Image (cartoon, rainbow, N blue to C red):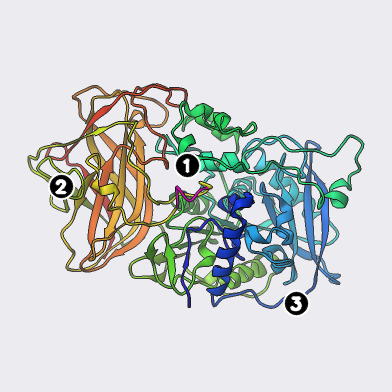
Amino acid sequence: MRAINLTSHACETRFAAESLLCLKLLVPALAVLSLAVVASAQSSQSRFSWPSPIHEVRVERSVLVPMRDGVKLSTDLYFPDRSTDKLPVILVRTPYNKNLWRGSGAPIYGWSQGDSPAYKFAGQGYVVAVQDVRGRFESEGNYTISTPDAEDGYDATEWISSQAWSNGKVGTYGCSYVGDVQVMQARLRNPHLAAMIPQAAGSSIPRRAFGVENGGAIELAAAFGWFTAEGSKLFLRPPAGAGADFWAKWGDRFYPGPNSPKLDFRKLWNTLPLADMLKNAGVPDTDFPSVLTHGPDDDWWVQRGYLVESDRFDTPALQVNSWYDFGVGETLYQFNLMRKNAVSSRGSDNQFIIISPTSHCRSELATAETIVGERNVGNAQLDFPGIYLRWFDYWLKGKDSDVTKMPKLQIYVMGKNEWRGEQEWPLARTRFTDYYLHSNGRANSRSGDGSLSPQAPAEETADKYTYDPATPVPSHGGPVCCTMTDEAPEGSFDQSDVEARSDVLVFTTPALTTGVEITGPIKATLYVSSSARDTDFTAKLIDVYPNGKAYNVQEGILRARYREGWNKKVWMKDGEVYEVSIDMEATSNYFGPGHRIRLEVSSSNFPRFDRNLNTGGNNYDETKWVVANNKIHHSSKYPSHLILPVIP
């Protein structure tokens, strides 16, 4: 069976319902590429597919559903034809144009006419409601990211459950933004919301809100890519006096949204100030300036409806994400939060999660030889269509099913290349193990003398390097999404070129004689100093293969001003040493015999993250920078170390 690379910017899958990244294919020049990759995907089909439809499907287009404030949201309803029963409903709320779910957007999603998940679910006896979120495409109102998606989801669920054709049970489904809106709605606990399947929904907590914030830095490539293609607040509206059936009659003739611009991404990434980047790209008004100016602890994020620690839940959820997705740590956090804060055993006992080895919204696209970036992670196929149908059949139709007997967690262990069932996160048998940084002060580049071991350091010379924002360390893959360009791909790639730089410190274990499995959250604790008032520190976990290929596994960043918490900013003084803790998300990776565990440390990872200009200023409105001379200390007093979740 032919392999397929899961970091191409073509359509995600027939099963994962949404993706931000996929919409870059609206750029006409990429249409041929999209069709070629779709053809490749179809030639490498998973052995798991949807069952044959039981029903023909009819579509009632562009029904206007009222919200509590009178704003009406345009909704397509997919009905199993000739069914006279009251039926369960699956709700999909999207900012990406509901009409694509009819199959007319084939080059974009790879769906032929009648082949989208809406048709698949409806063919199995569900009504499917696909709705444009507020202010997008055919829906009324003004668009602000994620606002008020929780309340609108609640109202849409309430309207659906009151219809004559509804049995009163509603499920939700979809990936990325379409997953986030489900998680955010769940905290309102509509009694008719019976179950949900949020996929790649790692953007719904304030400090990673919308996938833009990360360690106090900005996910620049993703934020710029998404807002240029999908962030517009400007949409065309029907003329005055147009009837409520305007979009139902004319929706196929008129496209209300802006076209994606063709841009020189690399040139624009390098422009300053950051706040003017979209203006320089000629993009209509967006929320990009707002996400830059509101810091990680700003109430502005909470007002958008993102989750807080005190939220309560009661909806059975099957969450799906991937190790090379930007929000996998947040998805696992949500899994635990929904168990801990459930108001009944129905909620606490029925939280499930599946983590694949792929990138954003691509779990269902795995084949017998799954390649993520350049890394072959084996046969990562899983029967997602079957699991999804059994999940909704159980919760919405009341059918007997073994779906709630599956493991609470199903994770794919990369390196061992196998699926495994678990019951909690982190795993109860985890041994959090410190791997200490060592060198004689010359860990610069992979040719340096940096090493990594469980043995604590004695007295060692600190490593130093220069971080110049004019020449940042380039990103090469990683857990990113939505960059809208192949110049910033996601996934796992050989980091040899990055490790040749003198501003990258490299610490590596000897070749392993026995394998080591790392499954769980990862953290780097570094003791640092800098000549600058503020700078960034980055950490990247690497699996070095016996042939020398150095594949990135996971990574993180911390803006030093936030080292004492997100709610205050503290500056550095030249010559003083500070402790910084870098959240490196989570993974499951087996470092086999002959492999080596490596940690890269630096102060930039661009364009994934915005460059810290080192001044201690706002960063987003600055055009000048200073060079930072940074040090990483490793000694008995300052034992810099990587904390790895080792599974015996």
Q: Is residue 524 magenta?
A: no
Dots 2, 1 in contact, CB < 8 A: no
- Say which element carries label 3: loop
- Amino acid tagged 3: Ile
Marks 2/3 in contact by CB < 8 Å: the verdict is no
Q: Position of residue 563 (x, y in %)?
A: 33, 32
Which residue is found at the position 57% from the left and 64% from the top?
36
Q: Amino acid at mark 1?
A: Ala
Element type where label 1 sits in the image: helix
Side of 151 where 473 appears, left or right: left
Label 3 neighbour load within 10 Å: few <14, some 14-19, many 20+: few
Dot in front, 3 or 1: 1
Numbered tag placed on residue 54 in the rendering:
3
- Tell me the CA gap for discs 2 and 3: 64 Å
Task: Please identify, in this view, whether the residue under mark 2 or under mark 3 is nearer the observer.
Answer: 2
What residue is disc 1 on? Answer: 221
The answer to whether residue 308 is visible is no
- Residue, disc 2: 448
Majority secondary structure of magenta residues: loop
Q: Which residues are magenta?
A: 485-489
Q: What is the distance, in whole Å, between disc 2 and disc 1 at their CAs?
A: 30 Å
Foreground: 624 or 149?
A: 624
Is 561 located above or below residue 207 in the figure? above
Query: In the picture, which quadrant includes the C terminus?
Result: bottom left
**Percent position of residue 186, x then y:** 62, 49
> Tag 1 or tag 2, which sits nearer the N-term?
1
Q: On screen, 408 above or below 386? A: above
